[in-house]
Image: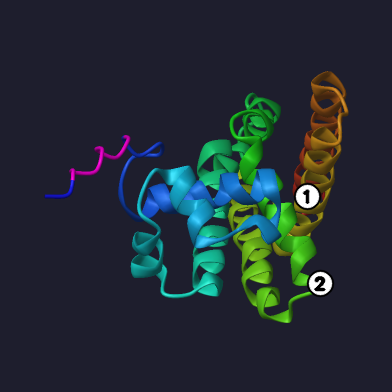
């Protein structure tokens, strides 16, 4: 009789589909997309690699699902909709986006760069950007910005996106926080200027 195999160690990220997506983010953040295999995800999540194929069916489906999940997690963690409309917590909330889970940001940048080489990722990456713009636009409208809201939201996100990249590249937390505060002041000026001129 063959000896029984040793019990598997507890899954690192919990169980189920979300645990696998969390593992994808960490694998890509640390090894790049070239390091993303079913085996690597399974090892990171502490599960059998057949479970990865069972949940997602293909590597491309796994990547697309992880990209959507990562953007949802980032928006939720940063309270992006709320940040755009609350003067007192704007900078604090957006710093949370940087500090709470930097692997989420690294993963998304890896996907953005890879989309230049793999056209099939262009759609999911475009959807990633639109999800951030949607969240900011909703917050800006609640904050009182009424003119060209989506354009303002995209411009604001471009600034935030660049600051996140700078932070990941080593710019200090204090410098990023100061820059975020300046961005916030521009948003306030936009809102108050439009209100004063009656622009809608």
Nearer to me, 150 or 42: 42
Residue beneath the point at 53% across and 70% down: 59
Q: Is residue 128 above or below residue 48?
A: below
Prevalent SS, magenta region = loop
Does residue 68 appear left or right of residue 16 in this picture?
right
Residue 40 vs residue 90: left or right? left
Identify the magenta region. 3-9
Asked whether 124 or 30 is in front, the reply is 30
Q: Is residue 122 above or below residue 136?
A: below
Which numbered disc covers residue 156?
1
Please report the residue visible at 75 percent of the width from the left and 45 percent of the height from the top. 191
**Disc 2: which residue:** 116
Q: CA distance from mark 1 to mark 2?
A: 23 Å
Residue drawn 56% across the image and 61% down it: 37
User: Left or right: 150 with respect to 22?
Assistant: right
Residue 107 position in % (x across, y down): 66, 50
Disc number placed over residue 145 in the picture, else none: none
Query: For the C terminus, which image quadrant?
Result: bottom right
Q: Residues within 10 Å of mark 2 (few under 14, many from 20)?
A: few
Q: Nearer the viewer, mark 1 or mark 2?
A: 2
Q: Position of residue 40 (x, y in %)?
A: 53, 52
- Residue located at (36% from left, 49% from top): 47
Colour scheme used in the picture?
rainbow
Place residue 4 in its image quadrant: top left
Residue found farthest to the front: 1
Place residue 7 in its image quadrant.
top left
Q: How far across and how far down the image is residue 164, in percent?
A: 78, 40
């Amino acid at each position: 009789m063959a000896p029984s195999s040793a019990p598997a160690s507890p899954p690192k990220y919990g169980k189920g589909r979300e645990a696998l997506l969390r593992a994808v983010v960490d694998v890509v953040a640390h090894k790049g997309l070239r390091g993303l295999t079913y085996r690597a995800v399974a090892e990171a999540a502490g599960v059998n690699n057949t479970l990865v194929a069972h949940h997602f069916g293909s590597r491309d489906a796994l990547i697309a699902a992880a990209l959507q999940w990562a953007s949802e997690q980032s928006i939720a963690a940063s309270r992006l909709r709320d940040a755009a409309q609350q003067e007192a917590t704007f900078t604090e909330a957006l710093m949370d986006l940087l500090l709470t889970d930097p692997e989420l940001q690294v993963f998304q940048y890896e996907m953005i760069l890879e989309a230049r080489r793999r056209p099939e990722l262009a759609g999911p990456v475009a959807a990633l950007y639109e999800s951030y713009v949607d969240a900011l636009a909703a917050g800006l409208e609640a904050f009182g910005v009424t003119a060209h809201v989506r354009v303002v939201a995209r411009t604001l996100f471009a600034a935030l996106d660049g600051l996140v990249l700078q932070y990941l590249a080593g710019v200090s937390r204090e410098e990023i926080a100061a820059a975020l505060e300046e961005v916030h002041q521009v948003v306030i000026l936009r809102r108050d200027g439009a209100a004063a001129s009656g622009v809608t």
